[in-house]
Amino acid sequence: MTERRILRRVRGMPTADGAGVKLTRLIGQPLLDHVDPFLMLDEFRSDRADDYIAGFPEHPHRGFETVTYMLAGHMRHADNHGNHGDLVAGSVQWMTAGRGILHSEMPVQENGLMWGFQLWVNLPARDKMTAPRYQDIGPERIPTVHPAAGVTARVIAGTFAGATGPVDGISTAPIYLDLALEPGAQVEVPLPATHRAFAYVFDGEAVEVAGEPLARGELAVLGNGEGVQLAGSKAGARLLLVAGRPLNETITRYGPFVMNTPEEIRTAVADYQAGRF
Ligand code: FE2
């Protein structure tokens, strides 16, 4: 098996989004514009209500998918296509915005820890104007596997260690794993050679990726290969390991719209303003 190695590493940039939610932007920032097909990765983590209470009031999206994975806390999703969902610890919400959707994600709690991730996954040109779709997946539907001693994996999307995640029908065939490694534990994770991949250590101390330490708070873009070798450091750690088939298409972004050309962005703005979402 050709092993994937760390190609580059970045730390996140503190920023705010929505109505003033404080977060850390890992992908979609000056140091790392995108990891095709992934356009953005945000981590929000705070036990200060002021940092999250304003939430993400109603706003539009077109041309890609937004994925919220919750570790702690409680938010509620609602959109103008009639979907509602409770974002609770361990749940995932995979929203395919397609040709247009208006949604909100608002905190239900008034205090306590709010912790999770939002990932933006691009859609290929042929699917950017597809019908919107919303997959609301409770924690009990995400399989947990133990592929090696001291290793626990939640399989959110894709297949790993005999388990297939509940997210289905996504253009870029993503793999989305939440991995916990106890001190000294080791595991090899196969990832299709066709896919681009990244790893982000969000808890504990560090993980060794192909023998190189990756500290908490660092995101590694992985090189090509068929799999990645991971090992827990002395204190153990938890990480996201995400992979997807790259699109190799032109990306034109304008806030919540991600299309291929500036003309398509102008159409998106006009359609939104005319109430066609
Ligand atoms: Fe959104």
Image (tube, helix red, strand yellow):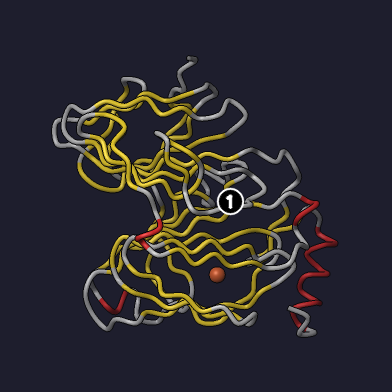
Q: Answer with left or right where residue 31 lies relative to residue 180.
A: right
Mark 1 Cβ inside 8 Å of ligand 1: no
Q: Quadrant of residue 9?
A: top left
Query: Where ligand 1 lies, by image quadrant?
Result: bottom right
Residue 198 at x, y percent in the picture: 47, 38
The residue positioned 69% from the left and 52% from the top of the image is 123
Q: Answer with left or right where residue 168 lies relative to residue 91.
A: right
Residue 4 at x, y percent in the picture: 47, 22
Residue 260 at x, y percent in the picture: 78, 53
Above or below — where is 105 with respect to 144?
Answer: below
Above or below — where is 233 with respect to 252?
Answer: above
Q: What is the tally of numbered marks visible in this picture?
A: 1
**Label 1 environment density (alpha carbons within 10 Å; few <14, some 14–19, many ≥20):** many
Q: Which quarter of the rendering shows the C terminus? A: bottom right
Q: Quadrant of residue 107?
A: bottom left
Above or below — where is 62 with respect to 182?
Answer: below
The residue positioned 28% from the left and 32% from the top of the image is 207
Say which residue label 1 marks. 39
User: Farthest front residue?
Assistant: 162
Foreground residue, 2 or 110? 2
User: Farthest top residue?
Assistant: 1
The residue positioned 34% from the left and 69% from the top of the image is 88
| Secondary-structure class at tag 1 | strand
Q: Answer with left or right where residue 176 lies relative to residue 107.
A: right
Residue 109 at x, y percent in the picture: 29, 81
Foreground residue, 206 or 236? 236
Kind of residue at badge 1: Leu
